[in-house]
Every structure is written in C-alpha cells, then in structure tokens.
Image (cartoon, rainbow, N blue to C red):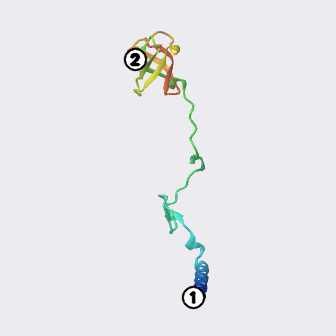
Amino acid sequence: MADSWNKKEREKKKQQQKKEKAERKQERKEQSKDSSLDSMMAYIDEYGNITSTPPDPSRRQEVKLEDIEIGVPKQRELDPSELIRTGTVSFFNESKGYGFIVDRETKERIFVHVNQLTEEIKEQDVVNYEVEMGPKGLNALHVKIVR
C-alpha cells in the first residue's frame, strides 16, 4: 500500500514539473514577442565600450581607407648612407677574433668578428661600419678605421 502512495506522489510531482515548464515556456514566448529590434541592438562608443544608446552623429569622424593598416606596416627602404655608422671599439680580443663596438649615436654595443674587418683594429679606435641583424643581435660588417 505504501508503494502505491509513493507512486501517486511521484506522478503528481512529474505533472507539477511539466506544468511549471510549460508556464516558463509560455512566458519566454510572450517576452520574445515584446522584444523589438531596437531593444536587442548594442552600440560601441568611442572608447570601445558596449552601450545601449546610439552614438552621437555630430562626433562622427571620417577615416580614409588608406589610413587603415592591417598587420605590420611595410618597412621603408633604407638609404645606404643610413646603414653606415660610426663608433668606438670598446673591446677587441685578437686571439679569439671578436670584439664590440659602441655606436656613437645610439650607444648600443655591436658585435664585430675578425672576418668582417678590412684592416686591423684595436681598442679605442674610431671605426665606420655597416650593421646587420644576426642571430643574437646586431653585427658589424665592413669595419674600417676612420682617419
């Protein structure tokens, strides 16, 4: 007898849940009819924030198509005179065949190898050189002493 009472209660509970689900479905249906396109619209203000108010047309700015850059901008062609730099040899080890040049303008330390020398150099010499990007940083090429 206890089983039949439990069964009836479970059936009652299922019926109640079905009824509640149908009511919620009906409420959603009614709400969707009330919502118009304007209530669903979202706008982005000049700071990139999402807002529900449309932007002010008087604050609109025109953007030229040519001004829009997607990706990395193209690198400009370098003038050969820009490639030639001047610096001072801060360190040079003749036995190992390498050293460093301190650039006069940027104060960067640039690696130099004995294979890139056109004449022998020593520390504190003022030199002209070209620069290329190596695997660990800038490398000096075609190093010449300034006379």
How far apart in space, not on screen, are marks 1 and 2 (Cα)?
98 Å
Percent position (x, y) of residue 123?
A: 39, 14
Given residues 49 and 12, the one toward you in this image is 12
For the residue labelled by badge 1, is the local secondary structure a helix, a strand or a loop? helix
Residue identified by numbered label 1: 2
Residue identified by numbered label 2: 91
Percent position (x, y) of residue 51?
A: 49, 66
Q: Which mark is residue 105?
A: none
> Which dot, 1 or 2, sits closer to the camera?
1
For the residue labelled by badge 2, is the local secondary structure a helix, a strand or a loop? strand
Question: Which amino acid, by three-letter code, is at mark 1?
Answer: Ala
Q: Quadrant of residue 31?
A: bottom right
Q: Quick check: marks 1 and 2 in contact, CB under 8 Å?
A: no
Given residues 30 and 26, the one toward you in this image is 26
Residue count near mark 1 (Cα–Cα under 10 Å), binned few <14, some 14–19, many ≥20: few
Query: In the picture provided, is 43 more to the left or to the right than 93?
Result: right
100 is higher (above) or lower (below) than 72: above
Given residues 55 and 21, the one toward you in this image is 21
70 is higher (above) or lower (below) than 95: below
Question: Which amino acid, by three-letter code, is at mark 2?
Answer: Phe
